[in-house]
Image: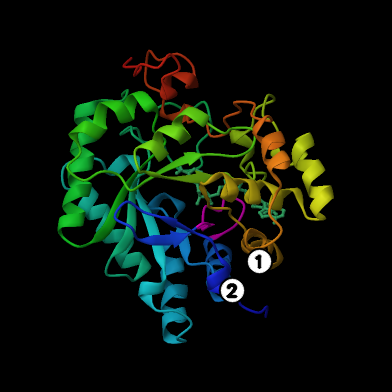
Amino acid sequence: MNSRIDQRTVPVRTLHGGEKIPCMGLGTFGSDKYDADTVSEAVYGAIKYGYRLIDCAAVYQNEDRIGKVLQRLFAEKEVEREDLFITSKVWNDMHGDGQVLESCQKSLSDLGLDYLDLYFVHWPFPNYHAPGCSGDSRNPDSRPFSVEEFMGVWRQCEELVDKGLVRYIGMSNMTIPKLEAVLPLCRIQPAALEMELHPSFQQPELFAYAQEHNILPIGYCPIGSPSRPERDRTAEDVEDMRLPAIEAAARAHQVHPAVICLKWAVQRGQIPIPFSIKEAQYISNLKCVTEDPLTEEEMEAIRAEDKNCRLVKGQVFLWEGSGGWEDLWDPDGVIVTG
Ligand SMILES: NC(=O)c1ccc[n+]([C@@H]2O[C@H](COP(=O)([O-])OP(=O)(O)OC[C@H]3O[C@@H](n4cnc5c(N)ncnc54)[C@H](OP(=O)(O)O)[C@@H]3O)[C@@H](O)[C@H]2O)c1
């Protein structure tokens, strides 16, 4: 087994309120490619190496397995609960009255924890689709975003904080118009915004908006999700690891292009949550942010590679009468209400 990283060398980010959390986490969505045992063994190895932030979700269908490895790590005295920052998310089919509490309690029980550090509303729509369904499947009950419905979910999240079941709450897959509509109504402000962020999809306006509002941007698909399921791929998708500025920096630093995507993410100020089940990969992913930073010129060259290339389009959440997947993301700066 590898050595452990020196925690003091891992940069940190500051949550509203002043608490420090690591600048990188580990994703746990196996993308239909890796089963729950494989993912949870990677969580075990990654925490042993020095990962402290783990991004979980009920819909990833592996929280019970991850719970087992957390208990193993506690029993082996590798880490204590307080050393870790564990997130989870309420899925779209659990937005109704009382269901957010039920979902949170199920995640807590599966993970074997008394509290979560951060709990996200995974998507701002109550629209359900079966895990693994094809991209063109639609649910006739799907509805567009509603401020009232979303606030019903958020109020339940606020109660989880009141009950001491979660320490912070966050939103995911939001847009500026949606945030503008809901932030003034929140009793407890979101601590973090989980959003797709990688070199070909930098979302500069939403990223800046989050930072201006003291909301930590957590970036998913930071390497461009090269293992995502076939059903989530389109001919227009750009491969981040083949962008000229990424390849040039990889050559200059003698590292894999994946590592350049992560150095860029951390130096820009978001918290990337790369997924990997391979020890050599997850070690190099965390190690790379402790050494040999990108130059200002390299950062600028990567900034210029933005292609507005969204990979997770979310088309399965569309409602009857909607246009294309863009409608989920309020393309004209106003909430698309259907
Ligand atoms: N909030 C949301 O709605 C949402 C949506 C999507 C994802 N997420 C979260 O974000 C996490 C990350 O997203 P993601 O898994 O889609 O994409 P990703 O982290 O961009 O890509 C993961 C893949 O990159 C490859 N990789 C990782 N490290 C590497 C390295 N050092 N060298 C070469 N290749 C490397 C691996 O491919 P191989 O396995 O083929 O080697 C791995 O499976 C998820 O696991 C999940 O926790 C959240």
Q: Is residue 77 visible?
A: yes
Residue 26 lies within the magenta run: yes
Q: Which residue is drawn at 40% across and 61% down?
A: 20
Residue 222 image position (x, y, % from top left):
59, 45
The amino acid type found where label 1 is placed reads Ile
In the image, 299 versus 265, the foreground residue is: 299
Considering the image in quadrants, where does the C terminus appear?
A: top left
Q: Which residue is drawn at 64% across and 41% down?
A: 224
Q: Is residue 112 above or below residue 202?
A: below
Residue 116 image position (x, y, % from top left):
32, 62
In the image, 289 versus 317, the foreground residue is: 289
Quarter of the image for residue 118 reads bottom left
CB at disc 1 and ligand 1 closer than 8 Å: no
Residue 57 badge:
none
Q: Residue at x 18, y 33 (%)?
A: 185
Q: Is mark 2 on a helix, strand or loop?
A: helix
Considering the image in quadrants, where does the N terminus appear?
A: bottom right
Q: Is residue 140 visible?
A: no
Q: What stretch is highlighted in magenta?
A: 23-35
Q: Is residue 280 above or below residue 306?
A: below
Residue 283 badge:
1
Q: In this view, does 326 lie above or below 291?
A: above
- Is the stretch drawn in magenta largely helix, strand or loop? loop
Q: In this view, does 299 lie above or below 16?
A: above
In the image, 113 versus 78, the foreground residue is: 78
Mark 1 and mark 2 in contact? Answer it, CB < 8 Å: yes
The amino acid type found where label 2 is placed reads Tyr
- The residue indicated by pointer 2 is 49
Q: Is mark 1 on a helix, strand or loop?
A: helix
Residue 216 image position (x, y, % from top left):
41, 46
